[in-house]
Image (spheres, helix red, strand yellow):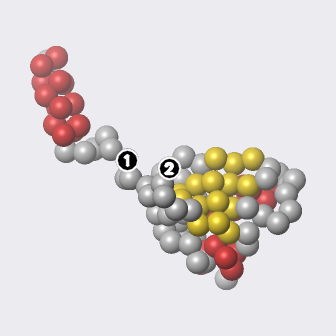
Amino acid sequence: MKKMALIAFAVLTLTGCNQKAQIDQSKMCIYRNSQEAKKCKAGELSWFKPNRWGSEQLPLGAAGTYCNFNHEIIYNNSGVICVFTDKRLHLLN
């Protein structure tokens, strides 16, 4: 039984089931509002960098609208860094 589990694990590892998609680390889309965010591309590293900060809700609103939740999201009350998604842009209209 142990041998079968090890074989299954090896097959899953070799076929890439445990790998995350690679994100291009050489560039970042920086946006301050929804108009600028529309210029970002899905799968791109992005930084929501508002003109003013201090609101607890502002970064969560940006993360909820623009961040791909399949990747790590870094945020505080001054901004958000995440992998951009365009799947929820229709919510802005």
| Residues at discs 1 and 2 in contact (Cβ within 8 Å) | yes
Q: Quadrant of residue 29?
A: bottom right
Up-down: is 68 above or below 34? Answer: above
Tag shown at residue 71 = 2
Cα gap from disc 1 to disc 2, whole angstroms = 9 Å
Quadrant containing the N terminus in the rendered view: top left
Question: Which element carries disc 2, helix, strand or loop?
Answer: loop
Q: Looking at this view, is 25 or 88 the one in front?
A: 25
Looking at marks 1 and 2 on the same chain, the residue that comes earlier in the sequence is marked by 1
Q: Amino acid at mark 1?
A: Lys
Q: Position of residue 18 (x, y in %)?
A: 31, 40
Image height of 73 relative to 83, above or below:
above
Q: Measuring from the top left, give residue 85's x and y in whole percent.
A: 53, 65
The reply, left or right, for residue 31 in relation to residue 70 is: right
**Which residue corresponds to the image point at 37% horizontal and 52% vertical from the top-left?**
21
Question: Residue at (21%, 30%) from the top-left corner?
Answer: 9
Residue 57 % position (x, y): 80, 56
Q: Which residue corresponds to the image point at 75% horizontal and 47% vertical from the top-left?
A: 76
The C terminus, quarter of image: bottom right
| Residue type, mark 2 in image | His
Q: Is residue 35 above or below residue 51?
A: below
Front residue (pair 34, 61): 34
- Residue bearing the label numbered 1: 20
Which residue is the extreme one toward the bottom?
Answer: 93
Residue for point 73% across, 69% down: 32
Can residue 83 be seen in the rendering of this structure? yes
Q: Which mark is residue 1?
A: none
